[in-house]
Amino acid sequence: MPKSIDILAARALLHSRAELIENGLTERQVRGLVEAKILRRVRRGRYVYEDDWKDLWNEGRHLVEVVAARLNSEGPGPVFWGPSAAVLHGLPLYRLAPRVVHVATVDARHGRTHARITWHNVDVDAADITVVDGIRCTTIERTVLDLARSLSQDAAVSATDAALRMEAVTRNVQDEDSAREWRDRMLVRAEHLHGRGIRQARRMIAFADGRAQLPGESVSRLHLSRLGFTRFDIQMHVVGAAGDDYWLDFGFLGARCFGEFDGLGKYFDERMKGDRSTAQVMLDEKLREDDIRGVTGWRLARWGSSHISTLDAFAERLAAFGIRPPG
């Protein structure tokens, strides 16, 4: 099961050529391991083992590439931008696998691509530059604006929801005052932007809701809006028969049905499972669902990534549970 990592873990996965040779390999052996697809060359003189690479989500793979690019740079290093800044801030890249590392030009350099690094000729004020674990990049607010105007709506809403969650959500509860301040601040910034994607950026910011905990939930919420749903809520709280607290991803009032985006991480990601086996997670989930049905009398609909791949597929999945848009 793929996993996510942070900057520290990305650094640990990378091995320099000098390190490999110090550990007993020869130059020829290093080349042979690359040819045999045991080692992957990420950047000049930087390698990761293929098994480690295969274990990562797209965000983790790109983070490894960004960290490698920083390790190979001199001085303060470049200012990572767009998707490359996003992975440094821990923002999701929904169904996006960047093919190059993205860097903002902060000098006279024109936009260009060299050695799988794309330099973007964009204006970045000093106030929009921050340092994350020793790596320079655009601030999270500037990064969200750049993503919201340049990515697909599905990817954009996933990033804006995640940024708002960091700002205003504790556990499953969103502080509405903090959320409103964030949206107002971001919309003011968006008003001063020019060029392609501005309307989409403003819409995604206004639409953002930090209660969505996974990109799949964000995209589901966007699909519901596209389908014309109005009478639904997210992160609905239910108290079980023994006083247990449950939070349901969606609640459809008219259909008296809860909805849950069922990401595979719940069953296979070690960080989400804790010390439970997959079988125990599945049993716990069944007991939870039985308790929720018992105390509410509502049904529960589930869907996964394949069901939100298109709007029609999502509408068909909902209809199978009697959940249909108004009118």
Image (tube, rainbow, N blue to C red):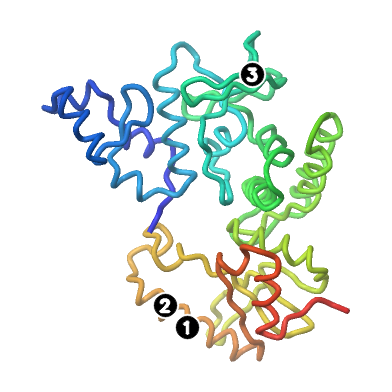
Residue sitting at 22 percent across and 39 percent down? 36
Q: Are marks 2 and 1 in contact (CB under 8 Å)?
A: yes
Can you give x and y, in whole percent of width and height, for residue 269 in the image?
Answer: 40, 60
Residue type, label 3: Gly
Q: Say left or right for 291 vs 105.
A: left
Query: What residue is disc 1 on?
Result: 286
Placement of 181 over or under 106, stated as above or below: below
Can you give x and y, in whole percent of width and height, for residue 162 in the image?
Answer: 63, 49
> In which quadrant will I find the C terminus?
bottom right
Residue sitting at 69 percent across and 57 percent down? 174
Q: Say left or right for 61 vs 254.
A: left
Can you give x and y, in whole percent of width and height, for residue 1 in the image?
Answer: 38, 59
Q: Residues within 10 Å of mark 2 (few under 14, many from 20)?
A: some
Which numbered disc, 1 or 3, marks the residue that appears first in the sequence? 3
User: What is the tally of numbered marks visible in this picture?
Assistant: 3
* Marker disc for residue 111: 3
Q: Nearer the viewer, mark 1 or mark 3?
A: 3
Placement of 124 over or under 109, stated as above or below: below
User: Which element type, helix, strand or loop, lies under badge 3?
Assistant: loop
Q: Say left or right for 212 vs 242.
A: right
Q: Is residue 62 visible?
A: yes
Which numbered disc, 2 or 3, marks the residue that appears first in the sequence? 3
Query: What residue is disc 2 on?
Result: 282
